[in-house]
Image (tube, helix red, strand yellow):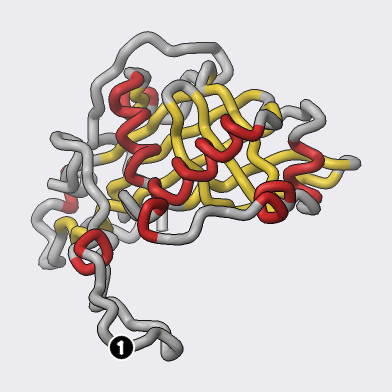
Amino acid sequence: MMASNTGGQAPVGNPPSERTTVKRMPHRGVYDRETINAILDEGLVCHLGFTLDAQPFVLPTIYARDGDQLLIHGSAASRMLRSVRSGIAVCATVTLIDGLVLARSAYHHSMNYRSVVILGTAIEICDRTRKLAAMRMIVNHVITGRWDQVRAPSDGEIRATMVLALPLNEASAKVRTGPPIDDEEDYNLPSWAGVLPLSLDAHAPVADPQLPGGIPVPSNVRFYRRGMLPGIVAK
Protein backbone atom coordinates (compact mmCIF):
# COMPACT_ATOMS: atom_id res chain seq x y z
CA MET A 1 0.00 0.00 0.00
CA MET A 2 1.65 3.19 -1.17
CA ALA A 3 1.14 6.74 0.02
CA SER A 4 -0.47 9.20 -2.37
CA ASN A 5 1.84 11.61 -4.13
CA THR A 6 -0.17 14.71 -3.31
CA GLY A 7 -3.16 15.81 -1.30
CA GLY A 8 -4.00 16.53 2.29
CA GLN A 9 -2.34 19.92 2.46
CA ALA A 10 -1.82 21.16 6.00
CA PRO A 11 -1.04 24.56 7.53
CA VAL A 12 2.66 25.37 7.54
CA GLY A 13 4.55 27.54 10.00
CA ASN A 14 8.24 28.05 10.73
CA PRO A 15 10.25 24.81 11.01
CA PRO A 16 11.84 24.64 14.49
CA SER A 17 15.03 23.02 13.18
CA GLU A 18 16.60 21.53 10.08
CA ARG A 19 16.35 18.06 11.60
CA THR A 20 12.58 18.22 12.08
CA THR A 21 11.73 19.90 8.78
CA VAL A 22 9.52 17.53 6.76
CA LYS A 23 11.40 16.54 3.60
CA ARG A 24 9.04 13.95 2.09
CA MET A 25 5.83 15.72 0.98
CA PRO A 26 6.72 18.98 2.74
CA HIS A 27 3.24 20.40 2.08
CA ARG A 28 2.01 18.09 4.84
CA GLY A 29 4.41 19.50 7.40
CA VAL A 30 2.85 21.34 10.34
CA TYR A 31 5.01 23.32 12.74
CA ASP A 32 2.68 25.42 14.89
CA ARG A 33 2.74 24.41 18.53
CA GLU A 34 -1.06 24.41 18.85
CA THR A 35 -1.40 21.57 16.34
CA ILE A 36 1.54 19.64 17.77
CA ASN A 37 0.15 19.95 21.29
CA ALA A 38 -3.33 18.86 20.20
CA ILE A 39 -1.99 15.69 18.57
CA LEU A 40 0.08 14.84 21.63
CA ASP A 41 -2.87 15.50 23.93
CA GLU A 42 -5.13 13.16 21.95
CA GLY A 43 -2.65 10.30 21.57
CA LEU A 44 -2.24 7.53 24.12
CA VAL A 45 0.96 5.71 23.10
CA CYS A 46 4.37 7.16 22.31
CA HIS A 47 7.04 5.12 20.53
CA LEU A 48 10.49 5.96 21.87
CA GLY A 49 13.47 5.24 19.64
CA PHE A 50 17.09 5.11 20.83
CA THR A 51 20.34 3.28 20.12
CA LEU A 52 22.18 1.29 22.77
CA ASP A 53 25.48 -0.48 22.03
CA ALA A 54 24.92 -0.05 18.28
CA GLN A 55 21.51 -1.77 18.54
CA PRO A 56 18.47 0.40 17.72
CA PHE A 57 15.31 0.00 19.82
CA VAL A 58 11.81 1.42 19.38
CA LEU A 59 9.53 0.77 22.36
CA PRO A 60 5.96 1.87 23.12
CA THR A 61 5.14 3.70 26.33
CA ILE A 62 2.40 5.79 27.94
CA TYR A 63 3.14 9.50 28.15
CA ALA A 64 1.63 12.91 28.86
CA ARG A 65 2.41 16.45 27.76
CA ASP A 66 3.28 19.03 30.40
CA GLY A 67 3.57 22.38 28.66
CA ASP A 68 6.69 22.28 26.50
CA GLN A 69 7.84 18.82 27.52
CA LEU A 70 6.78 15.21 27.11
CA LEU A 71 6.59 13.12 30.28
CA ILE A 72 7.54 9.44 30.02
CA HIS A 73 7.37 6.99 32.91
CA GLY A 74 7.98 3.36 33.72
CA SER A 75 9.76 1.03 36.10
CA ALA A 76 12.93 2.37 37.68
CA ALA A 77 14.49 -0.95 36.59
CA SER A 78 13.59 -0.37 32.93
CA ARG A 79 16.61 -0.66 30.66
CA MET A 80 14.98 1.77 28.25
CA LEU A 81 14.52 4.51 30.84
CA ARG A 82 17.89 3.93 32.50
CA SER A 83 19.55 4.25 29.09
CA VAL A 84 17.57 7.30 28.01
CA ARG A 85 18.21 9.21 31.27
CA SER A 86 21.97 8.99 30.57
CA GLY A 87 21.57 11.67 27.90
CA ILE A 88 21.56 9.60 24.71
CA ALA A 89 19.69 11.01 21.71
CA VAL A 90 16.10 9.84 21.37
CA CYS A 91 13.29 10.11 18.85
CA ALA A 92 9.71 10.05 20.13
CA THR A 93 6.75 9.62 17.79
CA VAL A 94 2.97 9.75 18.26
CA THR A 95 0.62 8.76 15.42
CA LEU A 96 -3.16 9.02 15.09
CA ILE A 97 -4.99 7.28 12.22
CA ASP A 98 -8.10 9.14 11.04
CA GLY A 99 -9.08 7.13 7.97
CA LEU A 100 -8.18 4.66 5.24
CA VAL A 101 -7.83 6.41 1.88
CA LEU A 102 -9.06 4.02 -0.82
CA ALA A 103 -7.96 5.02 -4.31
CA ARG A 104 -8.80 3.68 -7.77
CA SER A 105 -5.30 2.26 -8.10
CA ALA A 106 -3.39 0.11 -5.62
CA TYR A 107 -0.44 2.50 -5.77
CA HIS A 108 -2.33 5.56 -4.51
CA HIS A 109 -3.98 3.97 -1.48
CA SER A 110 -3.01 5.87 1.66
CA MET A 111 -4.16 6.87 5.14
CA ASN A 112 -5.34 10.08 6.68
CA TYR A 113 -3.21 10.61 9.76
CA ARG A 114 -1.73 13.07 12.21
CA SER A 115 1.73 12.43 13.60
CA VAL A 116 4.38 14.17 15.68
CA VAL A 117 8.13 13.55 15.78
CA ILE A 118 10.24 14.84 18.69
CA LEU A 119 14.05 14.79 18.76
CA GLY A 120 16.23 15.49 21.78
CA THR A 121 17.55 14.18 25.07
CA ALA A 122 15.51 13.46 28.17
CA ILE A 123 16.25 14.28 31.80
CA GLU A 124 15.06 12.43 34.89
CA ILE A 125 12.65 14.14 37.26
CA CYS A 126 14.01 13.36 40.73
CA ASP A 127 12.31 15.97 42.92
CA ARG A 128 9.52 14.13 44.74
CA THR A 129 6.92 16.87 44.36
CA ARG A 130 7.58 17.32 40.63
CA LYS A 131 7.74 13.57 40.11
CA LEU A 132 4.39 13.01 41.82
CA ALA A 133 2.85 15.84 39.77
CA ALA A 134 4.18 14.21 36.58
CA MET A 135 2.72 10.84 37.57
CA ARG A 136 -0.62 12.55 38.16
CA MET A 137 -0.48 14.14 34.70
CA ILE A 138 0.22 10.79 33.05
CA VAL A 139 -2.72 9.09 34.79
CA ASN A 140 -5.07 11.96 33.98
CA HIS A 141 -3.85 12.02 30.38
CA VAL A 142 -5.25 8.53 29.96
CA ILE A 143 -8.55 9.34 31.71
CA THR A 144 -9.27 12.87 32.88
CA GLY A 145 -9.84 13.07 36.62
CA ARG A 146 -8.82 9.47 37.32
CA TRP A 147 -6.05 10.37 39.81
CA ASP A 148 -8.52 11.76 42.33
CA GLN A 149 -10.69 8.62 42.11
CA VAL A 150 -8.03 6.15 43.23
CA ARG A 151 -5.36 5.60 45.89
CA ALA A 152 -2.28 7.78 45.48
CA PRO A 153 1.11 6.03 45.05
CA SER A 154 2.97 4.97 48.18
CA ASP A 155 6.54 6.06 48.84
CA GLY A 156 7.74 2.66 47.63
CA GLU A 157 5.73 2.94 44.42
CA ILE A 158 7.11 6.40 43.78
CA ARG A 159 10.67 5.12 44.25
CA ALA A 160 9.94 2.20 41.92
CA THR A 161 8.85 4.59 39.17
CA MET A 162 11.13 6.62 36.91
CA VAL A 163 9.83 9.72 35.16
CA LEU A 164 11.68 11.43 32.32
CA ALA A 165 11.01 14.78 30.65
CA LEU A 166 11.71 15.24 26.93
CA PRO A 167 11.65 18.91 25.80
CA LEU A 168 9.55 19.78 22.75
CA ASN A 169 12.25 22.12 21.42
CA GLU A 170 12.60 20.07 18.23
CA ALA A 171 9.17 18.83 17.23
CA SER A 172 7.17 18.78 14.03
CA ALA A 173 3.89 17.30 12.84
CA LYS A 174 2.82 15.73 9.57
CA VAL A 175 -0.83 15.57 8.55
CA ARG A 176 -2.76 14.06 5.66
CA THR A 177 -6.45 14.79 5.14
CA GLY A 178 -8.90 14.52 2.28
CA PRO A 179 -9.82 12.10 -0.51
CA PRO A 180 -7.53 9.91 -2.62
CA ILE A 181 -5.39 11.53 -5.30
CA ASP A 182 -5.52 9.31 -8.35
CA ASP A 183 -3.84 9.62 -11.72
CA GLU A 184 -6.04 11.66 -14.04
CA GLU A 185 -6.64 8.74 -16.39
CA ASP A 186 -7.89 6.58 -13.48
CA TYR A 187 -10.79 8.78 -12.38
CA ASN A 188 -13.19 7.07 -14.80
CA LEU A 189 -12.36 3.56 -13.60
CA PRO A 190 -15.39 1.64 -12.18
CA SER A 191 -13.79 1.23 -8.75
CA TRP A 192 -15.22 2.72 -5.56
CA ALA A 193 -12.89 5.34 -4.11
CA GLY A 194 -13.07 7.48 -1.00
CA VAL A 195 -12.21 7.57 2.69
CA LEU A 196 -13.18 5.08 5.38
CA PRO A 197 -13.01 7.19 8.58
CA LEU A 198 -11.54 5.55 11.67
CA SER A 199 -11.64 6.60 15.32
CA LEU A 200 -10.79 5.26 18.75
CA ASP A 201 -14.12 4.43 20.37
CA ALA A 202 -14.69 3.12 23.88
CA HIS A 203 -17.03 0.18 24.47
CA ALA A 204 -19.15 -0.38 27.57
CA PRO A 205 -16.96 -0.59 30.70
CA VAL A 206 -16.35 -4.11 32.04
CA ALA A 207 -16.19 -4.28 35.84
CA ASP A 208 -13.42 -6.13 37.65
CA PRO A 209 -14.84 -9.50 38.82
CA GLN A 210 -13.63 -8.64 42.34
CA LEU A 211 -15.38 -5.26 42.40
CA PRO A 212 -17.88 -5.09 45.31
CA GLY A 213 -21.46 -4.42 44.37
CA GLY A 214 -22.90 -0.93 44.51
CA ILE A 215 -19.88 0.93 43.12
CA PRO A 216 -21.09 2.90 40.09
CA VAL A 217 -19.07 3.48 36.93
CA PRO A 218 -17.63 7.03 37.09
CA SER A 219 -18.92 9.38 34.40
CA ASN A 220 -15.39 9.96 33.05
CA VAL A 221 -15.21 6.20 32.38
CA ARG A 222 -18.79 5.69 31.21
CA PHE A 223 -18.63 8.57 28.70
CA TYR A 224 -14.96 8.21 27.77
CA ARG A 225 -13.78 9.50 24.39
CA ARG A 226 -10.63 10.95 22.86
CA GLY A 227 -10.90 14.34 21.18
CA MET A 228 -9.87 15.42 17.70
CA LEU A 229 -8.33 18.74 16.72
CA PRO A 230 -10.97 20.85 14.91
CA GLY A 231 -10.15 21.29 11.25
CA ILE A 232 -7.72 18.35 11.09
CA VAL A 233 -10.21 15.65 10.16
CA ALA A 234 -10.67 13.02 7.50
CA LYS A 235 -12.83 14.53 4.75
- Please name the residue shown 31% across and 24% down the image: 27
**Front in this rendered view, residue 47 or 222:** 222
Residue 79, image x, y percentages: 80, 50
Residue at image mark 1: 213
**Residue 230 seen anywhere in this rendered image of the structure:** yes
User: Residue 222 occupies which quadrant of the picture?
Assistant: bottom left
Q: Which secondary structure lies at badge 1?
A: loop
Question: How many C-alpha atoms fall within 10 Å of the one at disc 1: few (<14), some, or many (≥20)?
Answer: few
Q: What residue lies at 44% left-to-right and 34% top-to-bottom?
A: 65
- Residue depicted at 47% across the width and 12% down the height: 16
Residue lying farthest to the top in this orientation? 14
Q: Quadrant of the N terminus?
A: bottom left
Where residue 172 appears, as percent x and y from the top left, is 44, 25
Asked if 107 appears above or below 201 in the picture, the reply is above
**Residue 202 % position (x, y):** 26, 68
Number of marks present in the image shown: 1
Q: Residue at x 46, y 21 (%)?
A: 68
Q: Is residue 73 left or right of residue 126?
A: left
What amino acid is at disc 1?
Gly
91 and 223: which one is in front? 223
**Percent position of residue 91, x then y:** 62, 34
Asked whether residue 142 is in view, the answer is no
The image shows residue 134, relative to residue 171, as above or below, that is: below
